[in-house]
Image (cartoon, rainbow, N blue to C red):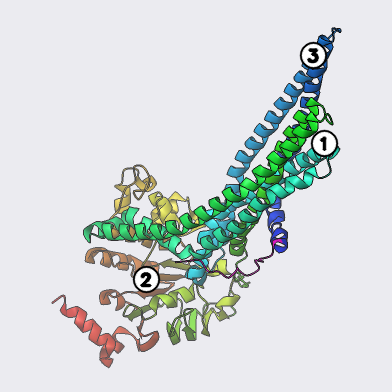
Amino acid sequence: MTAPAEPLEGESSSLFQRTLGVFRYSRRALALVWSTAPGLAIVLGVATIVAGVLPAAAAWVGQLIVDAVVAAIETREAGGDWDYRPALQWVALEGVIMIGIAGAQRTISACQSLLRALLGQRVNVMILDKAGTLSLSQFEDSELYDKLTRARREASQRPLGLVNKTFGLIQNGISLISFAAILFQFSPWAMLILFVGALPVFLSEAKFSGDAFRLFRWRSPETRMQMYLETVLAREDSVKEVKLFGLGPLLLERYRDIFRRLYREDRALTLRRDGWGFVLGIIGSLTFYGAYAWVVVAAVAGRITLGQMTMYVMVFRQGQSAVSAMLTAISGMYEDNLYLSNLYEYLEQPTATDGGWRSEGVVPGDGVRFEQVGFQYPGAPRPALHDVSFHLRPGQSLALVGANGSGKTTLIKLLTRLYVPSSGRILLDGSPLEEWSIDRLRARIGVIFQDFMRYQMQVGENVGAGDVAAFEDAQRWQRAAHLGQADGFIEALPEGYHTQLGRWFRDGQELSGGQWQKVALARAFMREEADILVLDEPTAAMDAQAEADIFQRFQEYARERMTIIISHRFSTVRIADHILVMDGGTVIEAGTHDDLMARDGRYAHLFRLQARGYQ
């Protein structure tokens, strides 16, 4: 398996364009750091300048120390009145400078550590906040999931990495300018030697950074599969089946197989990268020692003093390090920019705007109307719904019956505007759903889906999740739990409504399937102002007595409301005022229970088939 050879869109193969591309996201990363912690950014900038200037000053003072020592020795040997104090004064000054360098480096390190925590949190919040604006259909798009995976894996650390390299580039640039002022006194060619020595390694790093990014980007689906296998093998909601069916070794081997493939690719890239880095690094070493020899020859020839020789050698060594660090920083910035493209590509993912403004319809009390509604999932070969029409008025109940995959749950997702119809229209109180404010629309709907969430939170919070406005309202919890018939077992838990649920956290209590379903049903009852209640298989995990009790309460509660019930239990379905029988995304029968039984069609066949099971 090899990564695709062609460059990504917008990625140039020319060095000039790559260098320009380095700064594509640098400005945005710097702005992100500034908006996150301006005080720390200022301190980091000042410390960077200090750390950039002081090394040249230390080299210059080092020359003065050596020359002062040589002068004192020559004076003593000539029998003159020699004095060691000037040399000690320069030593003291160099000590102060080195303390300043150490302080600046410590300050830079501390700022980077604090910014890493603040910026990592900021970027993760941006990623999660963006997730809240995506539509359900976007979440079901595997390509977008790849973008989300790439953003979460790398992008949270890359902005700070890019900023650190930017400040490092500035620091080394300042150092290099001060070194250049010293080296120019020796020879104008000295700076050119420094750049030539460091350039090959820079070209190698830039090339392999691009290769690493393409590899990372290309194999996002496999990385996501690894994460999924980890979840299946280590989550309590899946471990029962994994153990029962003996899936552990099979899935673990699949996990290992993916790792082996990814590792082979990483190993090949690492060996190429480090091998070429070593070979090309030899050029830099030869360049330095050539310059070293040049300085030594100049000192032996008497063109420079011993102190100047010491200074030039030190400046050459530090200058080469500065040039190498600058070019490495530019290469790293290029790499960080590539990874930051994942973050901003995800954050700039287009999202549909709400666009609605209505808080009430043009015909109050008209209820819900589906008019020839159709819907087809992106990439699906056929529509999930086709030509569905019905009218549900306040005080009426509607039951949806049909085999799995007949479109029942899709219909509910259209009603709640999780999806937008491909054809036809849906009206609420005489106004199209797209004209309704999304918050106002969903405030009118209480829903329990068949695949409801089991939040690893307190029992009361699990109930309160049904209405965020009353998330911590204990009285509302109790009323909703009573309607969902969950109050009995909740009050028997160790800490009542404040009992932690699930096994992820300490002292968490696990519930049975039927108890969880009652909690989810109570969640739907939290929206006391909702006049549309949607129950998708609300009692599938409950016993017959619990089901009968719940629907008795439900009928009383829903007397003035519109209710939609999805169920395979005909004892539940027959209480509805109107029944739609669905098959293949279309309505094949409609009417009351008595009408459909008299018609002796699909509904009557299914009803009698189920009834025989109780005889």
Q: Residues within 10 Å of mark 2 (few under 14, many from 20)?
A: many
Q: Which callout, 2 or 3, points to the residue nearer the camera?
A: 3
Relative side of 548 to 441, left or right: left
**Distance from the alpha carbon under mark 2 to that under mark 3:** 96 Å
Q: Residues within 10 Å of mark 3 (few under 14, many from 20)?
A: some
Q: Which residue is mark 2?
A: 536
Q: Which mark is residue 182?
A: 1
Q: Which mark is residue 73?
A: 3
Q: Which callout, 1 or 3, points to the residue nearer the camera?
A: 3
Q: Main secondary structure of the magenta part?
A: loop
Q: Which amino acid, mark 3?
A: Ile
**x, y percentage for residue 443?**
52, 65
**x, y percentage for residue 515?**
30, 57
**x, y percentage for residue 605?**
23, 86
Q: Judge whether 120 appears above or below 592 on screen.
A: above
**Distance from the alpha carbon under mark 1 to that under mark 3:** 26 Å
